[in-house]
Structure formats: C-alpha cells, structure tokens
C-alpha cells in the first residue's frame, strides 16, 4: 500500500491539531462482513456450479474537538480490506463423454480511509476559514436480485454470486474556503463598521482525485476547481478555473473522460453564486450589467477549444401604469479551428394598463447571428414586433386582439411572416353557468430563396363552450377548424405554420406524424363529467378528428372514452374504457382498451387488490391483443409481545398474454403465475421466511416452480441471514437450479 507524500503531510498536520486540542471526543468504529454464495444449474446435458466466499474488514479512529478561539477540527484515520474467493466448474457432455472445465480465482483490495476537517471563524474580524480533505470511500460487494421478482425467462433463481468489489480505488476530495470582509456597504447593519470600506475577498478551492484501475470500468482522473472573488458594494470581480485530466485517455487506456481547462473572468453585478444584483438608478429605474471572458482548451479538439466574450445589459423601468424591460446581450466566440460565432439580442418588453378595462403588451426583438470560418459565412438576422390588447374586461365578453410581424434574413434567402389573432371570452357578468370562448387566428408566411419562392396561409377558428348543468354535472364542447394553403417547409422564427405531430402511444387513436401542404382539419370534442359525491365520479368523452389533405385519402379518427371512480374508506375502484376507430380511404382499423383497478382493505393489516388491462387492435387487418391481470393479497398480524409484526403473508396471481409480443423472458407470450411468501418474526430482531412460485408458460406447455426459505437477524449493529432457493423447469430444457447464500455483518 503506497501513501503519497501529500497524504502523509495531511496526517502529520492532523496530529499537530490533536496536540493543541483542549476539548475533544474520540471513538473507534469498525465493520466485519463475511458471506458465502453458491449457485448450481443443470440444463439438458450441461452442469455448472459457482461459489463465492467474500469477507471485508474495516477499522476507523475518529476524533473531533475544539481549539478554543482557534476553531474546531476533526480527524479520522482507518483502513479497509476486502477479498473474494471464486470457484466454478462446468461439466458438459461432448461426443458422449463428460468434459470438466474448472475455474478458480481470487480478488483482494484494500485502501486507506482518512478525513481531515478544520473550521475557523474569527470573533474580532470578518474572517472565515475552512479546510477539509477526505477519502471516505467504502468498498461494497455486488448484491443479488429479489428471487420472487426474478422473471427473466431463462434462469429460475438469481444466478450471480458475489464476484466483484466496488469502490476499491482512491477517491480523495479536498477543499479550502477563505472569506474576508463584508459584502454590504451598510455600516449600520455590519458587525464590523470600520471595515466596510475594504473589499470583500472570497476564495473557494475544490479538488477531486479518483483512481480505480482494477475495476470493471477503470477510471483515473482528477478535477480541480478554483473560484476567487472580490466584491465592493455590489460590484463583483470573479475568477474561475476548472480543470479536468483523464490519465487513462492520455495513456490510451480507454478512459471515457475529456481533458480540458476552462478559465472565466466576470465583472459586474452578478455575485459568486451567479445571482444577478439589481441597482437602483432612480426610484423607478433599475439596471444590472456584467461582462464575461471565457477561455476553454481541449487538447483533443480544436473545435471545442475557444475563447468567448459576453456582455449583458439589463434594465427595468416601472411606473404606475406601465413597465419596460430590456435584456440586451452580445456574445462572440472564436475557436481554434477559426470558427467565429457572434450573436446580438436586443429584446424590449413593454406592458401596462389603459383605464380599468384594458391591458396592453408590446414586444420588440432584434436578433443578429453571424458565423464565419475558412469555408464561408453564415448570417441570420431577425426582427419581430408584436402588440396585444386585452380589453372589455368588465363587460360580458372580453376582446383580445393581437398582431405580430416578423422578418428573417439569411444568406439563403428571407422570410416574412404575419400573424393576427382575435380572442373573445365570456365573464361572470354574462353567466355563472355558461362559459364561452372563441378565437380566430390567421398566419401568412412568404419565404424566398435562391431556388424557390413559397407561400403559406393558415387560418384557425376555435370555439369552446363549458356549461355547468348543476353542482354535480358539467358538460363542454370544443370545435377547432384549420384551413391551410401552401407550405414553406420551415420552422425558423417565432411564427411557425407547420402543424406539429401528436404524441400518442397508438397509431389508431392519434396521428403519429405531422402534416403540411393544402389541407382542411376539423377536431370536434364533447365531454361530460358527473360527480355524485366525493366518493363517486364518472366522465365520458367523444372526439372526431377529420383530416382532408390534398393528394391523400380522407383520414378520420373517432375516439370514445369513459371513466368511473368510486372510493370508500375501505374500498376503492376505478375503470377506464376507450374505443378508437380510424378510417383512411377504404381502409379501416379500430382498437379497444380497458383498464381497471380495485382495492379492498377491511382492516389496516389486510389489503387485497386487483389490477387488469385488456387491449385489442385491428391495425388494418393485423390483430394485436394484450391481457394483464394482477391480483395481490397482503395480511399481517402485529405482535402482542414486542413492537412490530408477528408475521406477514403475501400472495400474488398474475396473467400475462399477448399474441404478438413476448411477455416473459425472451421466449413466451403467455404466463400464468401464482406466488406465495411469508415472513414470521420469532422475536423483534429474528425472523424466518419462505416463498414459493409456480408458473405455466406458452408456447410449449412449459411449467416452472421455485421455492426457498431464509432465516435472518436484524439489529442496529448486527445483520445476517441464510437463504436457500431451488427451481425447476419442465417441458423445455428441463432446467434445475439451486442457490445457497449466507452472510453476516457486524458493526461496532
């Protein structure tokens, strides 16, 4: 075991703190873990067995104390060691003879555990200092899966034995923080009024070093981060340096990290936590500004090695009847590959009120993007202006007109887009039971390039009616009609006329792709919701989606759905049904999907639930169906002798069936399964458990069964258990499996 000079120096410093200590508390802690796993299997003419004996030991000395007015300290030192002994064999019948293949191996690992901490807070000066360095990485073994939930269709019980030690390498984290001075110039609020004229200083350093060369995923890298800041009043000067080195990548060892070095200088009204500070220019104008210079270097890539300069100037002006917000940004980026990117954004937002009935909003935005490299230049300049009014707010109906104009110029061409929209909605002055909303939206886009001149016009009319029949019954209807001519085939800019695709899990219930060109689209939706009480709720919905696209057949989608929810203190249930039908020309497809859930808990210790799903689809002649029924029962009895459960019983019945997909493992599309497990607590900390599972699989008329038992102990500082599982499959490969495991963990 090699100990670096830096680590040795840190340990010597810690002992120096210990010698100065006036108040201290110390303790010794440790851990012992030992375990054994074995797995045997037999399938057809092949037998295999694997076993693992693993153990781990650790011992740590920890001490914490106070140095009086000189601060507090903490120190820990220990060592951890682990080992795994693996043995395995395989007997295969080849040409009528038994051939034995054996394999034995061992794995050992150990590393130093240490922790150093020091904190100092001056009582007479605005000075804070803290330091830490630690490697408290703890090793662990690979665990095993839950045998009852193990459903991979090949193995019957968890196959893996403990064969790997995790976190065996070095993982050192070091940090230093130094803070001096006040960040506020208010001498009345300061504890040190005589020092408020001095600038505040902040230094924060972090270093992470990782070396784990013996892992299945080896790593050897370091990361250093430095942040130094100076503040006077609200003006901050900040320097950051972030450096990462991957030593495996340098040596060709296959490391996945990237070497880089990044330096940042920032000056302005942004603090060290990247929180923006606003300064009052007058009693109604405030502003914030900052400038950033960033340099990044990656040895592997000249395209990702660059210098970037950013300037930000933000301002907000607010009066009783209006407000203006300006967020100006300029960015220039130069890479080592001679790529130059520039971006200038000048957005202006103005909003206010006009009397008691009208709100207004105005938006101006100018954006200039330019790129150049040895191969050529790119330019993208856009201008946008938008105005929106919301008026007649105290009348029976509101009126909201909006107008937007946008122009985009580039080297490939230019685009002009116009959008006008009018919305109207009813208020409580019109009716308490009836809500009406209507809108008309018109978009026009003209795109000119060197090879084409395209135009597109999209008009959309929307109407919504919501009616409260009573306190228990509500109904609504929605109609949307879209008429489109032409296609520009672009989504550049804020005004976009391309119809977005619909995200849906079924190609029958919704269209999975977008559409453009000349088309007429109509979507009609009706909904009804009934609430008998807080316990009973029901709803129904119908929708008709019609698409008439030039050059394509008429596409119609109809959806009918309904739901029911009922709940009591001890019982609740829910059910949802959907039927979808899609017609494209003379082709027709339909789908029905039903889901349901019910739960009954007569006592706090008894819960029974059923969940079911059924779907059947005729996808243009291809029949697809899926069925899932899952029933669970749980019963537990509290102990009259000790606090906690005396025993617990769990039962599950499962049915999975599909005619086109695999539902279990990689072979079977039908599963019928019954499982039962129980747990009995002999004392509060000692338990015995057993489980069993039986499965019928198709195709092939295959049956599986698996059973097991375990005995365990659970204390705060002592845990251990012994487990045995056995499984058998008939009708396919006649597979037989056995697994035994025992482990003990003691802490002190």
Image (cartoon, rainbow, N blue to C red):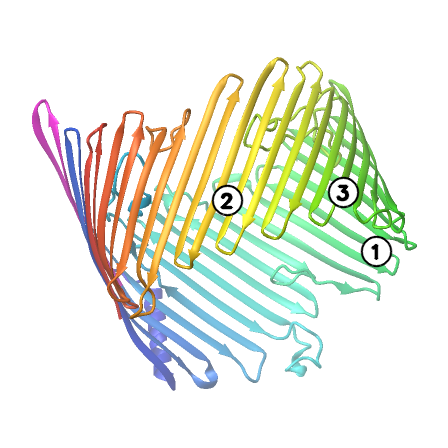
Instruction: Please report the residue visible at 67 percent of the width from the left and 82 percent of the height from the top.
Output: 193
Q: Residue 222 in the image: x percent, y percent?
A: 42, 54
Q: Residue 485 in the image: x percent, y percent?
A: 77, 21
Instruction: Please report the residue visible at 35 percent of the width from the left and 63 percent of the height from the top.
Output: 136
Image quarter of the C terminus: bottom left
Task: Looking at the picture, tell me which residue is in the foreground, 590 or 38.
Answer: 590
CA gap, disc 3 and disc 1 = 37 Å
Classify mark 1: helix, strand or loop.
strand
- Label 2 or label 3, whichever lies nearer to me, is 3
CA gap, disc 2 and disc 1 = 45 Å
Name which quarter of the figure residue 663 lies in.
top left
- Label 3 or label 1, whichever lies nearer to me, is 3
Pointer 2 with pointer 3, Cβ within 8 A: no
- Label 2 or label 1, whichever lies nearer to me, is 1
CA gap, disc 2 and disc 3 = 63 Å
For residue 298, the mark is 2
Residue with the mark numbered 1: 323
Precedes in sequence: disc 2 or disc 3: 2
Identify the magenta region.
80-106
Q: Is residue 204 above or below residue 256?
A: below
Q: Residue 670 in the image: x percent, y percent?
A: 35, 30
Task: Looking at the picture, tell me which residue is in the foreground, 78 or 174.
Answer: 78
Precedes in sequence: disc 3 or disc 1: 1
Residue with the mark numbered 3: 467
């Amino acid at each position: 075991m090699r100990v670096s000079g830096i680590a040795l120096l840190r340990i010597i410093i810690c002992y120096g703190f210990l010698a100065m200590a006036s108040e201290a508390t110390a303790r010794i802690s440790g851990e012992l873990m030992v375990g054994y796993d074995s797995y045997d299997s037999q399938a057809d003419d092949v037998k295999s067995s694997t076993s693992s004996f693993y153990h781990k030991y650790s011992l740590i000395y920890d001490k914490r104390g106070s140095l009086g007015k000189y601060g507090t300290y903490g120190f820990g030192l220990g060592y951890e060691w682990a080992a795994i002994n693996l043995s395995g064999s395989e007997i295969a019948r080849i040409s009528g003879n038994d051939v034995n293949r054996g394999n034995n191996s061992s794995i050992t690992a150990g590393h130093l555990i240490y922790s150093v901490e020091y904190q100092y807070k001056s009582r007479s000066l605005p000075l804070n200092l803290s330091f830490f360095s630690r490697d408290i990485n703890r090793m662990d073994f690979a665990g095993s899966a839950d045998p009852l939930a193990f459903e991979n269709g090949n193995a019957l019980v968890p196959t893996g034995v403990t064969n790997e030690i995790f976190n065996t390498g070095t993982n050192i984290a070091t940090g230093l923080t130094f803070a001096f001075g006040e960040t506020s110039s208010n001498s009345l609020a300061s504890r040190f009024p005589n020092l408020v004229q001095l600038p505040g200083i902040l230094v924060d350093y972090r270093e992470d070093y990782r070396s784990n060369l013996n892992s299945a995923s080896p790593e050897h890298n370091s990361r250093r981060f430095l942040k130094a800041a100076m503040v006077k009043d609200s003006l901050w000067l900040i320097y950051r340096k972030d450096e990462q080195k991957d030593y495996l990548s340098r040596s060709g060892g296959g490391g996945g990290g990237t070497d880089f070095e990044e330096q940042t200088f920032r000056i302005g009204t942004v603090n060290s936590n990247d929180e923006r500070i606003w300064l009052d220019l007058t009693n109604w104008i405030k502003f914030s500004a900052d400038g950033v210079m960033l340099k990044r270097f990656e040895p592997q890539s000249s395209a990702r090695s660059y210098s970037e300069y950013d300037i930000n100037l933000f301002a907000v002006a607010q009066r009783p009847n209006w407000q203006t917000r300006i967020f100006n940004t300029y960015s220039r980026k130069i890479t080592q590959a001679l790529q130059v990117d520039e971006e200038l954004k000048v957005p202006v937002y103005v909003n206010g009120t006009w009397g008691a009935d009208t709100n207004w909003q105005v938006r101006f935005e100018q954006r200039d993007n330019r790129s150049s490299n040895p191969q050529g230049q790119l330019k993208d300049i856009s201008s946008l202006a938008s105005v929106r009014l919301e008026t007649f707010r105290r009348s029976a109906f509101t009126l909201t007109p909006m107008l937007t104009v946008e122009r985009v110029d580039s080297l490939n061409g230019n685009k002009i887009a116009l959008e006008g929209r009018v919305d109207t909605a009813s208020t409580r002055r019109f009716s308490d039971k009836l809500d009406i909303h209507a809108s008309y939206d018109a978009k026009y886009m003209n795109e000119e390039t060197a090879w084409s001149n395209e135009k597109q016009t999209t008009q959309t009319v929307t109407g919504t009616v919501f009616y409260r029949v009573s306190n228990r019954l509500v109904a609504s209807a929605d109609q949307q009609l879209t008429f489109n001519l032409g296609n520009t085939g672009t989504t550049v800019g804020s005004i976009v006329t391309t119809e977005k695709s619909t995200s849906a899990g079924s190609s029958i219930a919704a269209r999975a792709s977008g559409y453009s060109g000349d088309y007429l689209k109509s979507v009609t939706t009706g909904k009804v919701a009934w609430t008998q009480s807080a316990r009973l709720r029901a709803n129904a919905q119908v929708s008709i989606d019609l698409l008439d696209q030039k050059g394509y057949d008429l596409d119609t989608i109809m959806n009918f759905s309904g739901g029911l929810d009922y709940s009591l203190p001890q019982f609740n249930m829910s059910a949802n049904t959907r039927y979808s039908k899609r017609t494209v020309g003379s082709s027709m497809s339909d789908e029905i999907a039903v889901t349901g859930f019910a739960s009954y808990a007569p006592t706090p210790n008894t819960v029974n639930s059923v969940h079911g799903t059924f779907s059947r689809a005729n996808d243009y002649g291809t029949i697809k169906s899926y069925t899932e029924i899952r029933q669970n029962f749980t019963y537990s009895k509290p102990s009259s002798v000790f606090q906690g459960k005396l025993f617990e019983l769990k039962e599950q019945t499962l049915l999975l069936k599909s005619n086109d997909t695999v539902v279990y493992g990689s072979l079977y599309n039908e599963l019928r399964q019954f499982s039962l497990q129980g747990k009995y607590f002999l004392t509060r900390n000692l338990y015995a458990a057993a489980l069993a599972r039986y499965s019928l699989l198709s195709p092939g008329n295959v049956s599986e069964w698996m059973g097991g038992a375990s005995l365990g102990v659970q204390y705060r500082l002592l845990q251990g258990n012994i487990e045995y599982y056995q499984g058998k499959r008939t009708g396919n490969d006649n597979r037989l499996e056995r697994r035994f495991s025992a482990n003990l963990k003691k802490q002190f």
